[in-house]
Amino acid sequence: MMWFWPFALATMIATASGCGEVAGPDIIGIDKVAHFALFGLLATLVARNGFPPHRAWVAVLLVSLFGLTDEWHQSFTPGRMVEVADWVADTLGAIMAVALYVRWPRYRALLEQPLRWRQRRIEKPAPLVPNQSV
């Protein structure tokens, strides 16, 4: 179960790479920001699920290679272009995310904390009892 999220995100990335057009805002460079963020998230998921902190560089290497294969995959998709800058953004995102995960203990602790859905407890007021003074 621990590899579910990295594989799910990698599948979504590969699926999007196979699409002729990907919807997005018309802002110059926004695709590089998306590459940086998505591959950073992927590297964090891989690092936290499979490698001790002193071996986290392996997660960066795996995600960078995945980014390279993603660009190669795009070369077969009509309407898509292969850009070295996308792969660089993928790799830099992976490096930054894993470095933060390994070097910042509070960030790592936050990521490792299980999610808890807290229910707000609405306390019922005590029933009103008439004053029974005699």
Image (tube, rainbow, N blue to C red):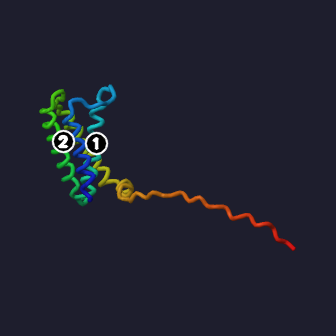
Q: Residue furthest bottom?
A: 134
Residue 128, position as x, y percentages in the image: 74, 64
Q: Secondary structure at mark 2?
A: helix
Counting residues from the start of the chain, the first of labels 2 and 1 encountered is 1
In the rendered image of this protein, does residue 19 appear above or below residue 105?
A: above
In the rendered image of this protein, does residue 8 appear above or below residue 1?
A: above
Identity of the residue drawn at 28% across and 42% down: 38
Q: Residue furthest right?
A: 134
Residue, disc 1: 38
Residue, disc 2: 67
Identity of the residue drawn at 18% across and 29% down: 80
Picture mark count: 2
Identity of the residue drawn at 28% across and 51% down: 44
The residue lying toward the viewer, choosing from 111 and 7, is 7
Q: Secondary structure at mark 1?
A: helix
Q: Please, what is the three-letter code of the amino acid marked with disc 1?
A: Leu
- The quadrant in which residue 122 appears is bottom right
Residue 59, position as x, y percentages in the image: 21, 52
Q: Are marks 2 and 1 in contact (CB under 8 Å)?
A: no
- The quadrant in which residue 16 appears is top left
Residue 70, position as x, y percentages in the image: 17, 39
Quarter that holds the N terminus: bottom left
Quarter that holds the C terminus: bottom right
Q: Residues within 10 Å of mark 1 (few under 14, many from 20)?
A: some
- The quadrant in which residue 54 appears is bottom left
* Left or right: 69 in relation to 23: left
Identity of the residue drawn at 61% across and 61% down: 123
Residue 27, position as x, y percentages in the image: 33, 26
